[in-house]
Image: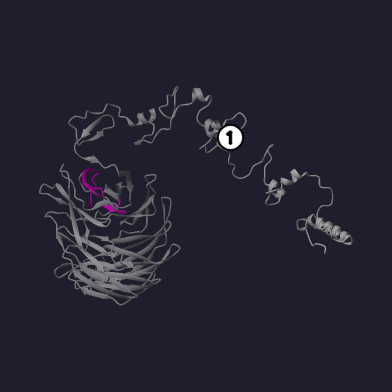
Amino acid sequence: MAVESATYINQLDATKPGATDLKSEGDDHLRLVKSAVKATFPNVTGAVTPTHTELNYVDGVTSAIQTQLDTKAPTASPTFTGTVALPSTTSIGPVSSTELGYLDGVTSAIQTQIDGKAPASLSTTKADIASPAFTGVPTAPTATAGTSTTQLATTAFVAATAFSSVLPGQTGNAGKYLTTDGTNASWAGGIATLSNLTQSQIGAVNMGLAVSAANPNKVYSIDSDRELILGNNGYCFVYSKAGNSIGSVVSWRSTAVSAFVALLIGTDKMLVVSCTTTAMEAVVLTFSGTAVTVGTPVATTLAGNISGSTINIQAVDTSYVIAYGRATSVSALRAITVSGTTPTVGTELALSGTTTIQASMAAVSTTVLLAVHTSSALLYATPVTVSGTTLTAGTLASTTSTSSAVSFPGLLASGRYAALYTNSGGTHGAIISVSGTTATISAVLLGSGTASFAVSGSQVIAGSSSNVNVLTDSSGTAVAGTAVALQVNSMTPVAVGSYLVGTFEGTTAEADVGFKISTSGNNPLVETYSIPTVGPYNSLSNPIRTSTKALGIGTEAQSIYWDGSAFSVVQSPAMNSTTRNANDNAIGWRFTLGYGTTQHVSRMELA
């Protein structure tokens, strides 16, 4: 019978060779067995000593044993890596699993945290967080005067805060406020002192020359701390709010002027343009702290005397366009550029129409300016191309007007512009569109006054002391709401952010009703508010105001205050409106004329 075939041991047939197989085939069977053994154990080159029991331990192994062992830590002095997870019952030496659990939630070195609490033994010198009982003389930081929180009050804080005499009694003093003469506290009737109005008494300032009360000073922000005060006498100084101090008074023009304007054109640099009769002058002022350096002035002669006391200025990229009126019935523009501290003044561009009123302006782009002005017959909207000091008028638009007065709310959220002017039937509103250098106008009768206005998105709330209405830009078309008449004896409302507020003044010169005017759709919405009647005080006309608040400051010490949601009567410093000049809506200055060259100066700011 033929010899069986096999490559490995498991392929050998235990029944072979059979009893009837030829003896001559025995050597073949032996060679087959040896071949299968060697093929099955090809790498065995010596004695294999494990017992069958030990060899059976390999059963179930799925990969190289050494590779698996290399990933395990020894039980003696193991070194772990990564995140080690231990059973909840784990203990380390004498430290039990319960004690180890106390470490849960610790975020930094325990000893460092303990050392920061107090010295010595925890059991005898540590204070509990809840209701601690201190001994000795515990100390704490002293709070700033006026602090009203749960912070600890030290004896130093109490001493700085308390009155030197006992507080007056409470009975019968409802609605009054507490005042002091520096020694004794007492109650004052009915009017609260406005805590967010600060007044700085700066002192006497030598302005060099007596300043006209009609147009004494203008105030311009340099930055969040400093303000430039320009006098129409040609003198100026810088005020620092941080130090409540002023720098030296310097001369910025050698003569008094009838009209002037300034614009911040860079860090610590301001362009000032002024005029008296036909003598116009441009000069750059630079600032270092409260010191003022006056650059070289550039003079220009007008073709006719300046009209009025107002010059407007508008930045268009790196050019600065001024608008002014001449007594020769011309409304004109000029462009100015500045190199370093040297201005260059361009030639005059006379606008259309016969008028002495300066134009209102808005920058349409980095190369185009919109100028809006009126004559006694027309309202004009003129796009002007600005290239350095060169001005070129585009295609203007006009509409009928019966007055040279115009109010210019300017840019709306729609990207178009609004103007308020007078025509037959009363106040009209205009929506002005500019495409390239071509202007178009859509106008509508509002029937309200133009004494004040507030911009709310693509709408303008226009009002006077008698009525109010809303002008809406509807895709370039002017739409009027329904005018609402105000109560008789109402004062002209003032703009506070995106709405108007005002007061009704009664027959005893006591305002007892306040009102807020906002919008409801395309119509004005008038809401009324009560005001406590305490005594004579001023209306909200000529106010100090922010985007949400307004304080009417005049010659009386009591004023009306709108806090954004209600009216009240407050005690405030009196400030003559003819000498108040606003740096911005939140700030007012008072320049009290004295004898000779001295002015007394104070500043008020509504927070």
The x and y percentages for residue 213 are 25, 53
Q: Residue at x 21, y 33 (%)?
A: 187
Q: Nearer the viewer, residue 407 or 120?
A: 120
In the rendered structure, which segment of residues is drawn in magenta?
557-586
Vertical placement of residue 93 versus 488, above or below: above
Q: Amino acid at mark 1?
A: Thr
Other residues around mark 1 within 10 Å, as few (<14) / some (14–19) / many (≥20): few
**Disc count in the image?**
1
With 210 as the anchor, is 127 left or right in this view?
A: right
Residue 569 shown in magenta: yes
Q: Secondary structure at mark 1?
A: loop
Name the outermost residue toward the right.
24
> At which x and y percent is residue 549?
27, 50
Confirm whether residue 233 shows in the render: yes
Q: Quadrant of residue 496?
A: bottom left
The residue lying toward the viewer, choosing from 10 and 410, is 10
Query: Taking 96 as reference, is 593 above or below it?
Result: below
> Colour scheme of this structure image?
one colour
Left or right, 381 with reference to 100? left
Q: Is residue 587 magenta?
A: no
- Residue denoted by label 1: 90
The one nearer the camera, 506 or 298, is: 506
For the N terminus, the quadrant is: bottom right
Q: Residue furthest bottom?
A: 395
Taking the image as shown, residue 290 lies to the left or right of residue 167, namely right
Indicate left or right for 210 with 109 as reference: left
Q: Is residue 358 visible?
A: no
Q: Residue furthest front?
A: 20
Image coordinates for residue 10, horizontal then vertical, percent: 75, 56
Residue 24, x across and y down, in percent: 89, 61
Q: Quadrant of residue 140?
A: top left
